[in-house]
Image (tube, helix red, strand yellow):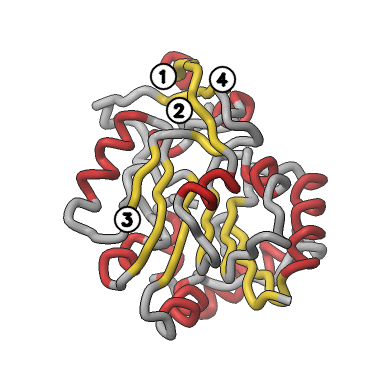
Amino acid sequence: MKQILHKILNKKTNIFTGFSYLFYNSKRNWSPPVVDNFDEIIINHIQPKNEFTFIQIGSNNGMSNDPLYDYIKKNKCKGVLIEPVSYLFKQLIANYKGVEGVYFENIAVSNTNSEKEFYIIKESDDDSLPIWYNQISSFKLETILTHKDYIPNIEQLITKQITPTITFHSIIEKYKFDELDILTIDTEGYDFEIIKTINFNVITPSVLIFENKHLTKSDYKKCLKIMKKHYLSIKENLTGDTICYDIR
């Protein structure tokens, strides 16, 4: 989700975007339609609101190709930013300093309120690392290791720790959300596990964005099946994210 390619693609011509669209959908004719980015969809769901509500699971530092940062800074809101990696959590708080209505949780979202093994990419000042190197911590070690072609020494950067976890609905209850305008999930392959825990009869986010690119084909199809029960509109972007909106 948080890849610099998002910004590069937006600067290309309509012709390039068209070819990208055809190429992308030719690989998976069962997948949703592709759009350049989600900005217009997000804006259309925020602008009519006096105060928009959100939960962001996997906030990183709040700025690295973040889909909500500008909207949170410029609009009245109530929301929760969730980031389990301690050094990124400190940056997250600093980057939102002075913003009202924003709450922070240094925790991971899972299917239980307990603890779980979590694989963290250690902070590094190595300039040879990709700009996104610190965005790939995950419950799933196998997902992190898929980046080895870009980070040959990736095993040396990984550390395992026991991380406190909380369920999505515990966050809803703690912060007393009666409705939710936007939910974003960016958890490096764990997105479907979180989505499976959501009781859409209790609360259905008006907009739900999740990262699909690290899901298996089987899991992504299952995830889309759930989404189609609750949303009329489902789209992808070219960097591996899915947006669901227009509640049924």
For residue 238, above or below residue 15: above
What label sits on residue 117 in the rendered view?
Answer: 4
Single out the mark in the foreground, 1 or 2.
1
Judging by the rendered image, the residue that carries numbered circle 1 is 157
> Of helix, strand and loop, which one carries label 3?
strand
The residue at the point 48 percent across, 47 percent down is 174
Mark 1 and mark 2 residues within 8 Å of each other at the beta carbon: yes
Q: How many neighbours does mark 3 have within 10 angstroms: few (below 14), some (14-19), or many (20 or more)?
A: many
Query: Of callouts 1 and 2, which one flags the residue occurring earlier in the amino acid sequence?
Result: 2
Q: CA distance from mark 3 to mark 1?
A: 31 Å
- Labels 2 and 3: the sequence-earlier one: 3
- Dot 1: what SS? helix
Query: Outermost residue, left direction?
Result: 98
Amino acid type of the residue tagged 2 in the rendering: Ile
Amino acid of disc 4: Glu
Q: How many marks?
A: 4
Query: Between marks 2 and 4, how big is the CA–CA gap?
Result: 22 Å
The residue to which callout 2 is attached is 151
Q: Which residue is mark 3?
A: 102
The front one of 180 and 214 is 180
Q: Position of residue 64 (x, y in %)?
A: 34, 50
- Give coordinates of residue 44: x percent, y percent: 48, 82
Q: Position of residue 135 (x, y in %)?
A: 43, 39
Do residues under tags 2 and 3 come within 8 Å of each other at their CB atoms?
no
